[in-house]
């Protein structure tokens, strides 16, 4: 099952502008950072900046995965709340 990702966080559309070495196309707008990724990154940033000590234990890799899953869980809740409002 594919989770809803909220669509692109920073959609783009337009035309290629070689004069200023910039591009902007409809084909690119749907790729890249999704709203889900953006929300999860914001949750992670807040947790890391809070200074709250995190228990890592002996299995560092597993603890990091658990935290990342928690960040995405919060992002999913934010997307659900966004749809409900």
Image: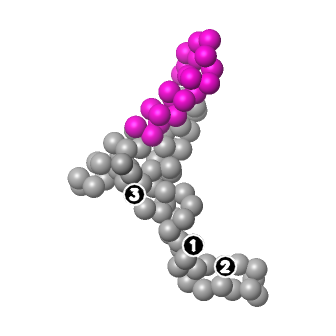
Residues drawn in magenta = 51-73
Mark 2 vs 3: CB contact within 8 A: no
Residue 64, x across and y down, in percent:
58, 27
Is residue 18 found left or right of 13 in the rendered image? right
Circle 1 residues within 10 Å: few <14, some 14–19, many ≥20: few
Disc 2 or 3, which lies upstream in sequence?
3
Q: In this picture, is 26 found above or below 77?
A: below
Residue 3, x across and y down, in percent:
38, 50
Q: Is residue 79 visible?
A: yes
Residue sitting at 45 percent across and 55 percent down?
35
Residue 61 lies in the magenta-colored region: yes
CA gap, disc 1 and disc 2: 9 Å
Residue sitting at 58 percent across and 31 percent down?
48
Tell me, for residue 23, which label it has, or none.
Answer: 2
Is residue 52 found left or right of 75 in the rendered image? right
Mark 1 vs 2: CB contact within 8 A: yes
Q: Dot 3 corresponds to which residue? A: 6
Residue sitting at 36 percent across and 48 percent down?
1
Q: Dot 1 corresponds to which residue? A: 28
- Can you say which quadrant of the picture contains the C terminus? bottom left
Residue 41 lies in the magenta-colored region: no
Q: In this picture, is 10 found above or below 77?
A: below
CA gap, disc 2 and disc 3: 24 Å
Residue 62, x across and y down, in percent:
56, 23
């Amino acid at each position: 099952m594919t989770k809803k990702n909220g669509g692109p966080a920073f959609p783009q559309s337009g035309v290629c502008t070689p004069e200023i070495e910039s591009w902007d196309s409809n084909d690119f707008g749907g790729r890249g950072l999704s709203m889900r990724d953006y929300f999860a990154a914001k949750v992670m940033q807040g947790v890391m900046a809070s200074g709250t000590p995190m228990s890592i234990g002996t299995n560092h890799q597993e603890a990091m995965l658990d935290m990342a899953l928690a960040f995405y869980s919060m992002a999913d809740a934010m997307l659900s709340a966004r749809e409900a409002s």
